[in-house]
Amino acid sequence: MASAHAKTTRPGEIMRTLVMGLWLPALFLAGLLYSFLPAFHHPTPRDIEVAVAAPPAKTAQLQQQLDTAFPGGFSLQPVGSAAEARSAVLDNDAVAAFAPAPHHPQLYGAQANGAAMESIIRQVFTSAGQNAGTTLDFHELVPTWPGDTLGTSPFYLLMACTLPAYFLVVAMQRAVGFSRRAHVATIVGGGAVTALASYLTAAYLMDAIPQHPLVLLYLFLLTQSVSLTSYGLVSFLGPLFPGAAVTLFIMLSVPSSGVTVPIDLIPTFFRYLHPVLPMGNAADALRNVDYFNAQQLGRPTAVLCAWVALGAALIVLGYLKHLRQLVREGLAGITGYVPAPPAEDPTAELPEPVALHPHRHHFGEQPPMLTGRVSGPAGQPLPGVTITVTDPHGRQLLHTRTDHYGEYAATGFHEGLGIVVASAPGQQPVATRLPLSTATPLNQDFILVPR
């Protein structure tokens, strides 16, 4: 016997469905408007370090002049000679260097620190030279790689490692037949392939970056920082993990990376994030390896390894959390017939039929489209009953079981007719045909009688 009735869709349920379906696109909108736009719309000098080959008194005078025109824009560091000023740029201790000779002042720059940065510095110091009636000579000390005239290749290289690392975690949520260990092994292997393909393409096929093997290490560390941390967040945030991962590794990491706009030209908030988030440290490591003789790699290496360790720790803690949950449910007499639904990115995944826990529904998960209870002739709940949903042509859409209370829940069906079958050993199976619809949730109860 079977009975079905449609639940009345209340305005509150409609609003909840809309919120759960639109929260991630809304997060992207907020990120673009309140993260990317403030960071990129008006690059302004902020505490740019420039070595000045002049006595401290003259350096202080020039500092005062620049503070009047650009408050807080430049930090001048006096050095003993023009050679020391050049060395400060070559060693990446200063963004630029200035030697204020009486008639022909010298300005030294490094395009590798960003074309926008170098352009602003040349404008500022050229203007200062003209005001003094002198002609400024500019010297390019660290140009970008000949195959990267615009200096944008590192950004696309880092994005090529970040986005696939995130989407690989999303794909692993569908690989429900894989163990946690297989998930992690796939993520690590996928990161290695992504890093290798990105490096070979950029360095050898396109000649967009120098052919330095150490770059491959930092690209791999970036993929693992993103993918392992994202995967570790799934156990604690469930369907909300895409929001946390996208916020950390895209919405905040890209503006603070210093690749698209140099770090000394963006607002203070993003400058604070730069030495903390993975992409900014990977960008610093690539720049130091490619252009500054692999100097100053301590902080980028330590931070990237710390993110990898954080991801590994989250995965271990998530596994322990899962074990504790199984123990609690076992003590409560609840058998785990229904696996947890996969945590999906709604912007990247099409809905697919999936079983839900009848008594636990978290924000971000799709609302149940089909629920029900299976009982015996006397009304007693029947746990472990197989619930199978097929389309009218017999293709199986879903296979699950009732829980300890004889209840089941499912969602992710496309519009159309479905055939729901309840069966158990020693019981007469029962089937019914139902119109499945996202707008009209159904409750389908079954009563099974012995054969």
Image (cartoon, helix red, strand yellow):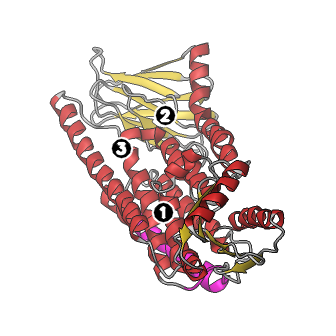
Q: In this rendering, does residue 141 appear at all?
A: yes
Tell me the element at label 1.
Answer: helix
What residue is disc 2 on?
Answer: 365
Residue type, label 3: Ser
Bin the neighbour count of mark 2 within 10 Å (Cα to Cα): few under 14, some 14-19, many 20 and up: many
**Residue drawn at 70 percent across, 82 percent down:** 147
Coordinates of residue 207 in the picture (x, y in percent): 66, 84
Part of the protein shown in magenta: 187-211
**Residue drawn at 56 percent across, 86 percent down:** 211
In the rendering, which numbered label is found on residue 281? 1
In the rendering, which numbered label is found on residue 187? none
Mark 3 to mark 1: distance in Å? 26 Å
* Mark whose residue sits in front, 3 or 2: 3
Residue type, label 2: Glu
**Side of 169 where 156 appears, left or right:** right
Mark 3 to mark 2: distance in Å? 14 Å
Q: Please, is residue 35 above or below residue 83 in the view? A: above
Give yes or no for contact between labels 3 and 1 (Cβ–Cβ under 8 Å).
Answer: no
Nearer-the-camera pick, 193 or 208: 208
What residue is disc 3 on?
Answer: 235
Nearer-the-camera pick, 381 or 159: 159
Nearer-the-camera pick, 106 or 317: 106
* Mark whose residue sits in front, 3 or 1: 1
* Mark whose residue sits in front, 1 or 2: 1
Coordinates of residue 429 in the picture (x, y in percent): 38, 32
**Residue drawn at 38 percent across, 32 percent down:** 357
Name the N-terminal-most of marks 1 and 2.
Answer: 1
Residue type, label 1: Asn
Coordinates of residue 101 in the picture (x, y in percent): 71, 76
**Residue drawn at 24 percent across, 37 percent down:** 325
